[in-house]
Amino acid sequence: MTLLRSQFMDALRVKGYSEKTVTSYVHCILDAVKLYRISPLLFTSDQIRKYLLVLIQQRTLAPGTVNLRINALKTFYTLMAPGSTVMAGFTQMKTPRHIPTVLSRQEIDRMIAALRKIRDKAIIMLLYSAGIRLLECATIKPVHIDSDRMKVRVEQGKGKADRYAGAGREHRGVVSHVGRPRETARADLGSAPCVREQAHVRCPGN
């Protein structure tokens, strides 16, 4: 590892960037270095422009990926070469906007009904009722679920912020299984409260 790379990584960490972002930004800078075989501190604006054109025209990278490289370069010069104007004039590429596919309540109910495992049902119910992100759901533990108020505590979610998300009360009996070990969830099925018919989850033993 070169001294410059090490210093850049340390500077990112001091700024509070996640390890994932640190690794991603370093990869972006190294990719540009491979093209010119010189220190990134010696790049000119014209070289950076040509590098971005290579990404767009030859590698046909998506706008979001190109914007990641632009962000990495801007951050690099802000931290490692304060006062540099090499990135002046470079802006984000326009990214296409797509209308998301929104499932109806009936479609969601059918999807939940098709799942056989209680834990899978709980995850889908929580995602749709609380509106949390998939990665946020992956970190949910039983202690994060307030069954009385049907609130879910999301720790260090988007923007590294903690927040509470509301979950539908009709899902109380199933959502409580999110984050539990598979064996524990299976053992608790016999005492799980009924879930309303609109969720198409039958009570154990019925």
Image: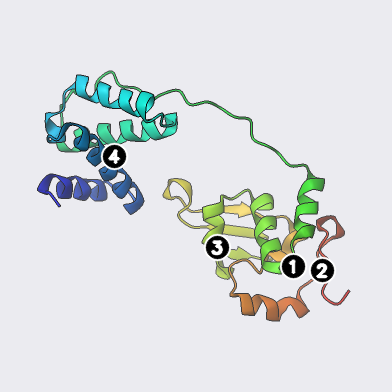
Location of residue 197 by image quarter: bottom right
Please indicate, yes or no, whether residue 3 appears anywhere in the rendered image.
yes
Residue type, numbered disc 3: Ile
Neighbor class of circle 1 (other Cα within 10 Å; few <14, some 14-19, many 20+) is: some
The residue furthest right is 206
Give the alpha-carbon distance from disc 4 to disc 2, as whole Å: 51 Å
- Relative placement, left or right, of 66 versus 31 is right
Disc 2 element: loop
Residue type, numbered disc 2: Cys
Image position of 49 with respect to 31: above or below: above
Single out the mark in the foreground, 4 or 1.
4
Q: Earlier in the sequence, mark 4 or mark 3?
A: 4
Image position of 206 with respect to 57: above or below: below
Give the alpha-carbon distance from disc 1 to disc 3, as whole Å: 16 Å
* Residue depicted at x 74% and y 42%: 103
Location of residue 172 by image quarter: bottom right
Q: Position of residue 155 (x, y in %)?
A: 48, 57
Give the alpha-carbon distance from disc 2 to disc 1, as whole Å: 6 Å
Residue type, numbered disc 1: Gly
- Which residue is tagged 2? 194
Disc 1 element: helix
- Which residue is tagged 3? 140
Residue nearest the viewer, comparing 142 with 187 = 187
Please indicate, yes or no, whether residue 81 appears anywhere in the rendered image.
no
Give the alpha-carbon distance from disc 2 to disc 3, as whole Å: 22 Å
Q: Are marks 4 and 3 in contact (CB under 8 Å)?
A: no
- Which residue is tagged 1? 173
- Which residue is tagged 4? 28
Image position of 74 with respect to 3: above or below: above
Give the alpha-carbon distance from disc 4 to disc 3, as whole Å: 32 Å
Single out the mark in the foreground, 4 or 2.
4
